[in-house]
């Protein structure tokens, strides 16, 4: 229920003037009279949905409206209420009941006059239907007339809706609503009993300081960010009872006065009446002294706490309010400090501390969600506090704040109020606040920021805010740079290095990727001197615009820094640390302005050329580029050469950054030009770097050599490669070697050429080159030595060929030799196809160079010319230049024939016979050769076919005893065949003597091998040759081997260590014997390789047996032979087992083969070839169980028996577990299978896990060992030593399940003997992870309560065994977060028209179910909206979101025309959940009615300027809108149309002077729909200053002349031109105007036009020709004139019009006519 508030005319004061205890009853009586006389409608209490401000509610930002500025209306519906009004204390300070009229008059005299009466009139339907209208409607406006009764009667249905967003904003009434104080005599008492008061149906509270006669304040819902406030209908009550309760506080010490509680400055919250009692606490005015009072009932769930108007002086106990969002502690007794307990209130969004005695906020902790802080009307002297990262509104009016020192960092502050503080005396306080807060500040002292102050704040340096926080007093911006530096200087000066002062500390304006220099200048005092040098260290930092959170930039420690792209908009800071010697002094700093975005145009920061400027060196240009936001690219480099007093010239091809200096660069200065270019193609300004002049290198010479043949009489020359500028007169020397001493003696100088003389023969020459440059500088000399000079060679002349030029003829060469002797000269013969000589080209040698001068022509020379090379020579062998001579004709040929034929050779067997013949008759072809055997010399002979065509014949056995002949038939190459000739051998063929051509022993000299004889017999047919074998010992004695007479012999043991040889006597078949031949010895004979002759196993091939072997050896004396045992797997792989003499077979060998590898080794260590044998498969042994033990057994613990098995691979043995009540022994144990009923089988596997049934019994295991092949062994039986023990009680799989909404069930699986009375419990886990036991929850089921919401539940299970043994408590996994039902939206509706420019509002409808009503009231947090537009996409429609459109309202834009819009609404609760989205769609958007807004004319106010019309068009797509330009005279309502001017641009002219230009814009839509015309006008069009100055001068003169041009032919049909114009003089004075044609040599001046200024005189201009004008005197006298410029035309027209207006009163309008 709302509180009734009656205020004085001062405003929303919460308490009246302090009322003494001795107040008379008359006071109360007067008040009662007033109460009775007031209309009942005035005494009621109303509920409002928002502030009574003229501003609109912005549902998008959900700004909260402070209750201290709200206007509330008084519902007339209370007039019919018969119930007694509830007595309620005024939470904002109501008017006490016992208030005297005099007191009220006294208050009234100090208050302002209520010039206007504010009323709130919002007609609404019930809750859900009123939402759209409320959201669409603006806040109640301040009315100037009383509202009607009908409107007031509807107010009772009004629903207060206060949407609150995270961004808090305050809305206040404008200053215009505050009226100045009237004189006391004119003011009536506010509670006057005047009858006129009854006519007033409602009066509203003026929260801005303006007053009304009666004011009633209502509370707006708390600025919660969760839900709108919906209240029920008003309850009836009486004003008197309400005032009675408020009067109970009249005697309090802190009674408020209009001065202490001025609602203009004190902002108080509205009570959140919608929130449930579990989250809201309202104890206003309950005289609470401590937050720890037992009746206060503070709990962690409270979100809205209102404790104003109490006696609180400490915050102890407030730390329990961990979820509080709104905390009102206004008007208590806090003095501070002591705000530390608020640190636990992390969710706090609004804190109200107004009206206390707080002197400091230093202990106020940082509250991460605080958005609103009211600390008005305290005793603060500064605002120093911790940084508040989300604070948006800070109200600190009516304090004692006198300084901004220590002002906190408030990065998102939007509203700052510091009215009625001494601080207001500070000049430009608003600008200082902007510097401290930054760009987020929107309002200062409840006003929009002044443009002048905003502009002023921008002029201050960046460090000003930092200085203000340290106590700096703001000065004028032009002095701020110097004074802030002096302020910081005073703080730093005590820490400067001794003897130094800081002169400058600044940073250049930073730009993106551009050089930013810092400037720190320390100067040394002249009176002091230091030994060490001052060194400055730099460190750059990066921070926000608030000058906070500066972080060091890595590696930024230089004087220059290049801001990066991501640092745009941020602040740079540089700390400079002075260092003297090893002492570092405290740093000083400088702060930059925000980093600006780069231009994207690179620029060269520095250009350097490196390298020594000496000819031949390589220099390199290096550019340091600031890319200024562009992508670094490759710049363009080039080199230019600039000579003295000349312009630079581009060096062709020098386009790299490196360049090698050449001779052309000497005495020139080089220019390195570099143009930076980004990857985007942006080019910067080219920069140049000039070098010094290039110097020539010192003169030097290289590669010195002597050119020419070192022969007597030749001319030689010395040359070399000169380097070092231009070569001057270099020096040359020639020196000759002295044979006796070896020294060189100068023989010539001054020239590089030299002619060899006879004295130089046999000696060497030296050439010396001394380089000298053009300037005469001499370099280091270089010399070279030649070879020995040779004597001049001999010559031959008169060379001739004498003789017959035929094949086989002999020819001779003759010649005259000089310089040598003919006998020593040499001749070489050649042949050639050419008839003329060309050196040795084409010559083919027929002989070598010989002394003989005669030559027989060979067959190969037939058809060729013969050439002779005659080389003259001296006796000592020195040759001269050869001479060549060629025959006169080619050589002729003869018929093919033989000039001789013979057989030579050995006529015995094996001999070689060779046939020789001489061929003549041209070039021989394929002559034919045949050999014949003859029994006698006269027979025809037998042809030997095998050697036909050969000239040689090796005599074979077949020819023994016979004659042999050779026949040759000559054949020329052209096929001509000559006469054959035959030659007979001289004797018969003899057989050869028997002999051995070769004899050797073949075979290896090793024991046991066979040696064979390899021989080559010759000498007829072999008979039985004789062999004998010999043995040669180490003593060299040779002994024949007995019985060794064959051609082969086997080496035995006896031959070891000796040499073996064989002899052979060749025997021919006819028993002719040849010489005995002895072969070479082989040996010594070595023993044979060690060999294993036989190998076999010894032993049984069965598991468990020992296997050995028997081996026989041969091959010398036996050594330590190696025997290796291997196992052979099925895949053929071998695994080495042992090297012992035997092998014990194991289980691993079963089923595998065993291989034995025996390697024989001789005693000398030689190894023989290994021999191996492989056994059969190893068979397994019989299965046997060796041991079996059963361990002690425990419940649920697997019992693993210990057993040992032998007998091949163990198979799946048979295991039987028995449970026996008693322990068995002996035969009973062995015969367990036939025991009594007390023995029960309980398992059939190797291992066994005892169960509950086995507890207390003995376990027996019967084992039948089994081999893998199924063969059984003898069984074994074992029994446990002790009975099976029970397990410790435990529980597993503990879990909690949700059975129903809010109902949970816990379950678990017990283990550990028999379960007894186990214990159950339930726990609650908070979001902080704290687990709390829920008292009384000791069963398996649990029903969740409100305390469990937003927590998780855990089920606890403590197992208890039947013997009371208690196990360990097990907790289940936490359940999902226990949450109530999710808020849902039943329907979403759109209000408003789907027309461009209209506002669409989305309204959600809440389900009517009780559960949904509850969750919406308690747990709803936010309602989020998103607007979309629909697009046709193929077979369906797609949605595109509208960026930034996230409020419930949306203004339809032009782009939306034709589209369908959709609004999506999602509700979130306090637990962070989101509901299913609800949708609402519109029909296609229609275009709005065409209109033009903000129409204005741009352009300066002179008659020569261009004007343009600008405006914002809305209403669909614009068509051909109409624009008309007009003129308007001052003081006249008439508009003069300017014909033809219908464009958006208009160029003014001289006819517009003195008028306002008016543009009428008629908006027309594309479909032709025409909107309402809108007009805009300019200021008066003035004369352009230069023209005005000239016109004024001429008007002051009163008489002027102008030189003009006039057309010769005034025929209007003729086109005027420059060629048909004549000169005229225009004379103008105060009385008349005259046009005079000047005189000439043949004529006098003639007046062509004269007239006064009397009507209808006027001057016309032409818009199509700005140089022409027309003077009209009357209907018959007029003239068109032309000047050379528009300026002169305007001067003439204005001068004439100025002079004309002095003599007539004709309106200027009638004088202005436009030529179309």
Image (tube, helix red, strand yellow):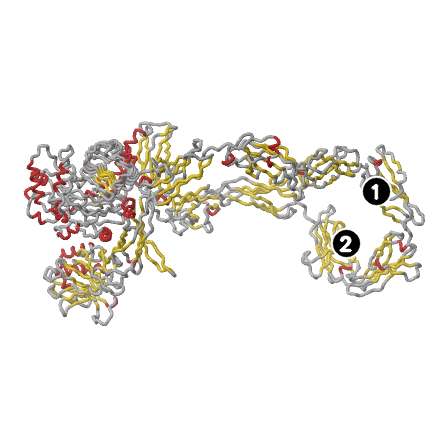
Q: Picture coordinates of residue 1512 (x, y %)?
A: 25, 57
Position of 1485 relative to 735 (above/below) = below
Observer-nearest of 1491 and 323: 323
Disc 1: CA contacts within 10 A as few (<14), some (14-19) or many (>=20):
some
Give the total of numbered labels.
2
The reply, left or right, for residue 1475 in relation to residue 652 is left
Q: Which mark is residue 805?
A: none
Which class describes the residues within 10 Å of circle 2: few (<14), some (14-19), or many (20+)?
some
Q: CA distance from mark 1 to mark 2?
A: 67 Å
Quadrant hosting residue 1272: top right
Q: Is residue 1649 above or below residue 1264?
A: below
Could you tell me residue 1691's position as x and y percent? 19, 59
From where the camera sits, is residue 479 visible?
A: no
Outermost residue, front side: 1236
Q: Nearer the viewer, residue 355 or 1130?
A: 1130
Residue 1214 position in % (x across, y down): 60, 39
Q: Is residue 947 above or below residue 1215?
A: below
Viewer-nearest residue: 1111 or 639: 1111
* Position above or below: 1354 against 140: above
Task: Examine the image and state in which quarter residue 1480 appears.
Answer: bottom left
Image quadrant containing the C terminus: bottom left
- The residue that disc 2 covers is 853
Tags 1 and 2 touching, CB below 8 Å: no
- Label 1, on which residue? 1011
In x, y percent, where is residue 392?
26, 42
Q: Is residue 751 left or right of residue 925?
A: left
Image quadrant holding the N terminus, namely top left
Q: Single out the mark in the foreground, 1 or 2.
A: 1
């Amino acid at each position: 229920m709302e509180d009734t508030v009656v205020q004085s005319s001062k405003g929303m004061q919460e308490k009246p003037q302090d009322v003494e205890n001795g107040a008379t009853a008359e006071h109360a009586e007067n008040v009662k009279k007033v109460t009775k006389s007031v209309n009942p409608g005035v005494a009621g209490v109303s509920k409002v949905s928002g502030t009574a401000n003229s501003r609109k509610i912005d549902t998008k930002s959900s700004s909260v409206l402070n209750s201290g500025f709200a206007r509330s209306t008084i519902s007339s519906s209370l007039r019919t209420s018969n119930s007694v009004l509830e007595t309620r204390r005024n939470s904002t300070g109501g008017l006490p009941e016992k208030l005297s009229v005099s007191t009220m008059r006294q208050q009234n005299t100090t208050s302002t006059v209520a010039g206007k009466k504010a009323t709130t009139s919002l007609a609404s339907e019930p809750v859900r239907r009123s939402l759209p209208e409320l959201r669409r409607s603006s806040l109640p406006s301040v009315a100037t007339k009383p509202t009607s009764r009908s409107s007031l009667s509807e107010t009772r249905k009004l629903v207060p809706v206060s949407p609150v967003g995270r961004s808090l904003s305050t809305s206040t009434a404008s200053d215009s609503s505050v009226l100045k104080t009237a004189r006391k005599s004119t003011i009536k008492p506010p509670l006057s009993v005047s009858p006129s008061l009854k006519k007033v149906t409602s009066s509203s509270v003026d929260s801005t300081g303006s007053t009304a006669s009666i004011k009633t304040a209502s509370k707006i819902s708390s600025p919660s960010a969760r839900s709108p406030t919906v209240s029920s209908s008003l309850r009836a009550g009486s004003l008197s009872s309400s005032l009675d309760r408020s009067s109970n506080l009249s005697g309090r010490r802190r009674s408020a006065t209009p001065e202490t509680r001025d609602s203009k400055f004190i902002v108080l919250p509205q009570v959140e009446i919608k929130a449930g009692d579990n989250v809201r606490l309202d104890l206003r005015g309950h005289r609470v002294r401590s937050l720890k009072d037992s009746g206060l009932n503070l709990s962690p769930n409270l979100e809205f706490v209102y404790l104003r108007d109490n006696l609180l002086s400490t915050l102890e106990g407030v730390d329990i309010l961990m979820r509080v969002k709104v905390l009102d502690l206004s008007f208590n007794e806090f003095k501070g400090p002591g705000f530390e307990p608020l640190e636990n209130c992390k969710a706090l969004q609004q804190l109200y501390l107004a009206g206390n005695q707080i002197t400091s906020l230093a202990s106020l902790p940082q509250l991460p969600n605080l958005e609103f802080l009211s600390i008005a009307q305290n005793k603060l002297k500064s605002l120093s506090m911790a940084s508040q990262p989300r604070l948006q509104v800070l109200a600190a009016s009516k304090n004692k704040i006198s300084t901004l020192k220590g002002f906190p960092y408030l990065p998102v502050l939007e509203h700052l109020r510091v009215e009625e503080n001494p601080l207001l005396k500070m000049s430009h306080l608003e600008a200082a606040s902007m510097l401290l807060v930054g760009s987020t500040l929107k309002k200062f002292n409840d006003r929009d920021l002044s443009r002048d102050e905003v502009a002023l704040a921008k002029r201050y340096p960046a460090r000003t805010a930092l200085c203000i926080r340290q106590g700096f007093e703001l000065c004028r911006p032009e002095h701020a740079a110097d004074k802030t530096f002096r302020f910081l200087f005073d703080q730093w000066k005590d820490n400067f290095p001794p003897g130094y002062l800081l002169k400058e500390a600044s940073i250049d304006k930073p730009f993106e990727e551009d050089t930013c220099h810092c400037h720190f200048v320390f100067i040394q005092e002249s009176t002091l001197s230091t030994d060490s040098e001052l060194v400055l260290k730099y460190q750059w930092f990066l921070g926000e615009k608030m000058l906070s959170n500066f972080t060091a930039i890595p590696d930024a420690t230089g004087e220059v820094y290049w801001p990066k792209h991501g640092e745009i908009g941020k602040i740079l800071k540089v700390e400079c640390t002075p260092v003297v010697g090893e002492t570092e002094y405290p740093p000083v700093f400088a702060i930059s302005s925000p980093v600006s975005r780069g231009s994207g145009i690179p620029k060269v920061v520095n250009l350097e050329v490196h390298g020594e400027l000496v000819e031949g060196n390589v220099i390199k240009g290096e550019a340091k580029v600031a890319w200024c936001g562009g992508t670094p690219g490759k710049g363009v480099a080039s080199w230019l050469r600039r000579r003295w007093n000349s312009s630079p010239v581009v060096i062709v091809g020098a386009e790299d950054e490196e360049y090698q200096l050449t001779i052309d660069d000497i005495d020139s200065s080089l220019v390195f030009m570099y143009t930076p270019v980004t990857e985007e193609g942006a080019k910067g300004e080219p920069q140049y770097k000039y070098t010094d002049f290039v110097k020539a290198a010192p003169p030097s010479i290289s590669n010195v050599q002597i050119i020419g043949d070192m022969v007597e009489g030749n001319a030689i020359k010395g040359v070399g490669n000169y380097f070092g500028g231009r070569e001057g007169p270099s020096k040359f020397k020639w020196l000759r070697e002295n044979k006796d001493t070896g020294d060189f003696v100068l023989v010539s100088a001054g020239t590089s050429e030299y002619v060899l003389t006879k004295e130089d023969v046999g000696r060497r020459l030296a050439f010396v080159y001394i380089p000298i440059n053009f300037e005469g500088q001499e370099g280091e000399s270089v010399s070279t030595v030649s070879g020995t000079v040779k004597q001049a060679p001999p010559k031959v002349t008169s060379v001739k060929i004498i003789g017959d030029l035929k094949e086989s003829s002999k020819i001779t060469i003759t010649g005259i030799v000089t310089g040598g002797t003919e006998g020593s000269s040499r001749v070489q013969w050649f042949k050639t196809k050419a008839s003329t000589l060309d050196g040795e080209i084409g010559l083919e040698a027929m002989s070598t160079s010989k002394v003989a001068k005669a030559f027989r022509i060979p067959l190969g020379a037939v058809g060729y010319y013969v050439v002779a090379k005659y080389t003259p020579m001296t006796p000592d062998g020195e040759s001269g230049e050869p001479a060549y001579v060629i025959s006169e004709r080619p050589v002729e040929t003869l018929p093919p024939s033989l000039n001789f034929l013979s057989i030579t050779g050995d006529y015995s067997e094996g001999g070689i016979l060779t046939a020789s013949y001489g061929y003549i008759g041209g070039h021989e072809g394929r002559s034919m050769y045949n050999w014949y055997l003859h029994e006698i010399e006269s027979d025809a002979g037998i042809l030997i076919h095998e050697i036909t065509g050969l000239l040689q014949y090796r005599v074979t056995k077949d020819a023994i005893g016979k004659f042999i002949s050779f026949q040759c038939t000559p054949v020329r190459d052209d096929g001509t065949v000559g006469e054959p000739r035959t030659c007979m051998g001289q004797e018969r063929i003899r057989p050869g003597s028997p002999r051995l051509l070769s004899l050797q022993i073949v075979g290896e000299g090793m024991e046991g091998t066979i040696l064979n004889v390899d021989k080559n017999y010759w000498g007829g047919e072999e008979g039985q040759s004789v062999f004998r074998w010999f043995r040669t010992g180490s003593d060299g004695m040779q002994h024949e081997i007995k019985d060794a007479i064959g051609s082969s012999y086997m080496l035995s043991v006896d031959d070891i260590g000796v040499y073996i040889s064989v002899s052979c006597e060749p025997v021919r078949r006819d028993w002719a014997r040849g010489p005995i031949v002895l072969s070479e010895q082989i040996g010594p004979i070595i023993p044979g390789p060690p060999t294993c002759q036989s190998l076999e196993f010894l032993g049984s091939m069965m598991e468990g047996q020992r296997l050995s072997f028997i081996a026989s050896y041969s091959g010398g004396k036996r050594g330590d032979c190696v025997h290796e045992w291997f196992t052979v797997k099925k895949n053929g792989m071998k695994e080495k087992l042992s090297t012992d003499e035997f092998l014990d077979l194991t289980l691993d060998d079963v089923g595998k083969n065993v291989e034995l590898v025996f390697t024989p080794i001789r005693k000398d260590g030689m190894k023989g070839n290994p021999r191996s044998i492989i056994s059969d498969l190893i068979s397994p042994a019989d299965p046997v169980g060796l041991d079996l033990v059963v361990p002690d057994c425990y419940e649920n613990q697997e019992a693993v028996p210990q057993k040992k098995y032998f007998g091949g691979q163990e198979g799946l043995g048979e295991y039987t577990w028995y449970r026996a009540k008693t322990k068995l022994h002996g035969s009973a144990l062995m015969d367990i299978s036939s025991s009594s009923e007390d023995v029960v089988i309980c398992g059939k596997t190797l291992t066994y896990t005892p169960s509950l049934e086995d507890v207390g019994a003995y376990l027996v295991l019967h084992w039948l060992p089994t081999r893998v092949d199924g063969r059984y062994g003898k069984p074994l039986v074992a029994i446990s030593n002790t009975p099976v023990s029970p397990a410790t009680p435990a529980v597993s799989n503990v879990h909690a399940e949700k059975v129903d909404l809010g109902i949970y069930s816990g379950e678990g699986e017990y283990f550990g003997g028999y379960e007894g009375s186990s214990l159950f419990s339930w726990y609650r886990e908070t979001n902080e992870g704290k687990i709390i036991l829920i008292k009384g929850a000791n069963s398996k089921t649990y029903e969740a309560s409100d305390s469990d919401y937003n927590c998780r539940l855990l089920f606890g299970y403590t197992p208890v065994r039947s013997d009371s043994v208690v196990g360990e408590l097990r907790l289940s996994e936490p359940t999902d977060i226990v949450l109530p039902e999710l808020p849902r939206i039943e329907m979403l509706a759109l209000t408003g028209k789907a027309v461009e420019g209209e506002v669409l509002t989305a309204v959600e409808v809440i389900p009517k179910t009780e559960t949904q009503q509850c969750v919406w009231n308690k747990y709803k947090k936010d309602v989020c909206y998103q607007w979309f537009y629909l697009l046709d996409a193929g077979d369906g429609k797609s949605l595109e979101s509208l960026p930034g459109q996230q409020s419930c309202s949306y203004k339809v834009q032009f782009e939306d025309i034709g589209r369908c819009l959709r609004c999506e609404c999602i509700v979130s609760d306090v637990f962070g959940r989101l509901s299913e989205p609800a949708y609402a769609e519109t029909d296609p958007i229609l275009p709005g009615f065409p209109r033009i807004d903000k129409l204005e004319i741009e352009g300066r106010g002179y008659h020569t300027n261009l004007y343009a019309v600008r405006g914002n068009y809305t209403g669909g797509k614009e068509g051909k809108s109409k624009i008309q330009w007009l003129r308007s005279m001052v003081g006249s309502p008439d508009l003069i149309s300017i014909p033809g001017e219908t464009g958006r641009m208009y160029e003014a002219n001289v006819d517009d002077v003195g008028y306002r230009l008016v543009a009428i814009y008629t908006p027309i839509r594309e479909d032709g729909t025409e909107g309402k015309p809108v007009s805009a006008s300019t200021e008066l069009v003035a004369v352009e200053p230069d023209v005005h100055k000239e016109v004024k001068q001429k008007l002051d003169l009163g008489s002027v002349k102008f030189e003009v041009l006039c057309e010769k032919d005034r025929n209007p049909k003729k086109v005027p031109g420059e060629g048909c114009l004549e000169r005229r003089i225009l004379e103008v004075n105060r009385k008349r105007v005259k046009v005079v044609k000047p005189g000439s040599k043949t004529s006098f001046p003639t007046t062509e036009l004269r007239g006064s200024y009397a009507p209808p005189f006027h001057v016309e201009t032409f818009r199509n020709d700005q140089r022409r004008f027309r003077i009209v005197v009357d209907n018959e006298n007029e003239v068109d004139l032309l000047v050379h410029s528009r300026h002169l035309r305007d001067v003439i027209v204005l001068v004439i019009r100025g002079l004309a207006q002095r003599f007539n009163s004709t309106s200027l309008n009638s004088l202005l006519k436009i030529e179309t």
